[in-house]
Image (tube, grey):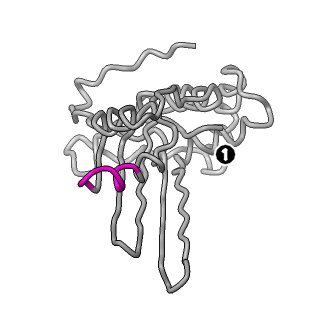
Amino acid sequence: MGGLPNEEGVVELDSCCMHGPTRRAGSVGAVRNIKNVSMVGKAVMEHTGHVMLVGEGAERFAVAMGFPRENLLTEHSRKIWLLWKQFNSDRDWWGPGIADPHWHPPTPESKPQADVWRERIQELQQRAADLGIEPEFQLAAVRRVLFSPTGTIHCSVLMRRARCRAITTTSGLAFKLPAGAAIRPSSERVATPIRM
């Protein structure tokens, strides 16, 4: 299936690892175009004096260490992102936030909440079908749009003499603001065109 992308449709990955006996650690954040970021985090630990590299610097380091650049956005994840863009064009992460003087709570629906959710899910399922998402995956895609998931995997290993090693990797919150995003007022926000 692939990791779900950020708001711009780009997959960004994070990873960290730790070697307990030596108390060394390495990590990378907001890495684009590199698949095996857990190995890149390990390379940071083994080949640099740093603990963390992020963004473009982490990607350049990965390429210098022999990791190939590749597009991480699968066709399936791209379709879910398109569905999210269509559904959230006026309700996305950019606010206004609750502290903004222009914020107001959503207007209450005249229908029962269960009916509102049922209609919303049916509308999204139809949009998912229009985007070419296979019928058996449509409800899962709708769920990802309504409740943005996180994709984190962790593994800890306890070795002899209570020595520990650990690694975590994630694509983070689905549809998150991209790393390095400049915060701008919603009045300056431009809608992203959707290409099919």
Residue 145 seen in render? yes
Disc 1 marks a residue whose amino acid type is Asp
Residue 8 position (above or below residue 36):
above
Residue 47 position (above or below residue 158):
above
The quadrant the C terminus occupies is: top right
Residue 92 seen in render? no
At 31% from the left and 38% from the top, the residue drawn is 55
Residue 180 placement: quadrant: top left
Find out whether residue 48 is within the magenta segment.
Answer: yes
Residue segment shown in magenta: 43-50
Residue 122 placement: quadrant: top right
Find out whether residue 159 is within the magenta segment.
Answer: no
Q: Which residue is identified by label 1?
A: 115
Residue 144 placement: quadrant: top right
At 42% from the left and 53% from the top, the residue drawn is 42
Residue 123 position (above or below residue 25):
above
Residue 169 x %, y %: 49, 53
Neighbor class of circle 1 (other Cα within 10 Å; few <14, some 14-19, many 20+) is few
Residue 15 x %, y %: 43, 52
